[in-house]
Image: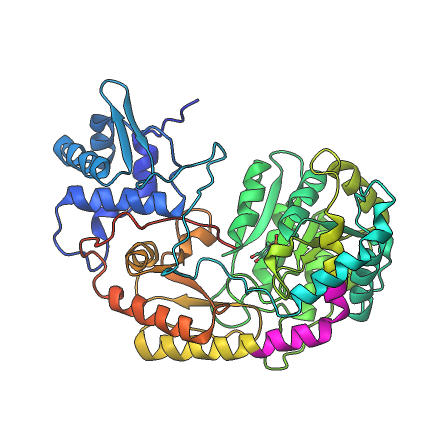
Amino acid sequence: MTVLVRGTQLARLLGQWHALPGRRRNPDYLALASSVRGLLADGRLALGVRLPAERELAEALRVSRTTVTAAYRELRESGHLNSRRGAGSWTMLPGGHRVASSGLWTPQDDLDMIDLGCAALSAPPQLVPAARAAAEDLPRYLGGAGYHPTGIVELREAVARNYTERGLPTSAEQIMVTSGTQHALDLVLRLALPTGGSVLVESPTYPNALAALAARRARIATHGLAPGGSGWDAELLLSAVRQSRPRLAYLIPEFQNPTGHLMSAELRERVVAAAHAGGTDLVVDESFVDLPLDGTPVPPPTAVFDRHSRVISIGGMSKPYWGGLRIGWVRASAPQVQRLAAARVGVDMASPVLDQLVAVRLLAEAETIVAARRTQLAAQRDALVAAVRASLPDWQVVVPNGGVTLWAELDGPISSALSRAAEEVGVRLAPGPRFGLDGTLERFLRLPFTLPAAELVEAVHRIATVRYDLDRAPTHPHRRQPAVIA
Ligand SMILES: Cc1ncc(COP(=O)(O)O)c(C=O)c1O
């Protein structure tokens, strides 16, 4: 079934398309076409949807029909629109890219592209030896059917031990292994959030968490984080929990993605108390807990303050180890874990045994691996900060003391426009609005420091070259390829 985008909907998505700061007097139709391409590149406008009729869009944008006709022609010529006389125009991709029916892009490998859309490290050198050793461990499991909906016991024990060492006594029965933290979040939402339920999230927050919430048709309220200082405004956060009593709150207390903020122990305790009082379940995403930098002490896990099974913690191997492993987990009460496992069999049955064995092997070397990651990340962060300060001195960056991302405050509401321009010089960015709900956050840009320092410096150099010339004619209009943000 084709989805039709109405003129008013597209106008809302396009926002200030005609008034981008720094835009030279390009004809309106080119600016309009370029903004539509930008929406496609960001994934905010889906592929295969039918755009409004020219007259309808012209009315919604209060421009002449000729402008829209010319913009649609421009989009057809660049391969972003497919029109059939009398039937309408559909969004598409140039260069024969295909889109799965899920709406997922299938980007080609582009070796020149520096991908700052993904905040994830490449695999550590210990991965291949761990995989070899895991293959040796596999025969122990081959006599059984191989389905372990809560995960293999040795991995559950290793994860439980980790929590216990962090000051939160945990048994293997309280751990369920999942296929990544994202999967953990999806399962928890299935269990804890009725369709259409109310949820409180930080703004900005992790975009794929918003996607998981959208799949539950959640009614989302936001708590705005300050770019500097401690991030969370304790009084506002607590009164948001107390007054609006959301069904669930999703928080990232350790080196929050994207801001890098670390929540204090005191606020953790107060949030848990407020959640208990208001009947709110807390889902705490600990993706970055292993990655403090500069020796920063990490407060105890949020669930330490929980005496009423109100806190469900999720985490995984992706950030300290490797995203390609697809190993995550949930820590909850033992009965909750059983309910999650029951929900899971209707989804994917269980996680692959071999991958879990690799995870066990890697966790056995956690100290060495994670220490090297922290050293690497601190050096890359410092190189990125230095490059931004040298080449883009008008930007404000607060140096995070952990995690993998900088949240830069730009010198204007230019994040989406800059991301489109950067794509043309071979840098893929995740613009600020991807981390919020309503197209705001245009003054911000997330810059991960997960790539080698030389690539980060080169990326900043390229971004700086396009910063002051945002609306020049695209030199490679066909290179734009939205991709995974993680
Ligand atoms: C806060 C947060 N949660 C979850 C994820 C997804 O992690 P995984 O790869 O384990 O599914 C990420 C990845 O970027 C993240 O930043």
Please tell me in which quadrant of the rendered image residue 372 appears.
bottom right
Give coordinates of residue 359: x percent, y percent. 73, 60
Q: What is the total number of numbered labels drawn onto the structure image?
A: 0
Give coordinates of residue 17: x percent, y percent. 25, 47
- Residue 334 position (above or below residue 228): above
- Residue 390 position (above or below residue 325): below
90 left or right, relative to 451: left
Dividing the image into four equal quarters, which quarter contains ligand 1? bottom right
Do we see residue 329 in this rendering? no
- Residue 285 inside the magenta-drawn segment: no
Give coordinates of residue 482: x percent, y percent. 40, 48
* Quarter of the image where the N terminus is located: top left
Give coordinates of residue 46: x percent, y percent. 40, 37
Q: Residue at x 77, y 69 (%)?
A: 364
Q: Residue at x 52, y 73 (%)?
A: 400
Q: Residue at x 49, y 75 (%)?
A: 381
Query: What's the magenta region?
Result: 361-375
- Residue 366 inside the magenta-drawn segment: yes
Along the line of sight, the residue nearer the viewer: 116 or 312: 116
Q: Main secondary structure of the magenta part?
A: helix
Q: Residue at x 78, y 66 (%)?
A: 162
Along the line of sight, the residue nearer the viewer: 371 or 6: 371
Please tell me in which quadrant of the rendered image residue 339 appears.
top right
76 left or right, relative to 426: left
* Protein image colouring: rainbow
Along the line of sight, the residue nearer the viewer: 353 or 409: 353
Please tell me in which quadrant of the rendered image residue 370 appears.
bottom right
Along the line of sight, the residue nearer the viewer: 194 or 455: 455
Do we see residue 54 in this rendering? yes
- Residue reaching furthest to the top: 86
121 left or right, relative to 426: right
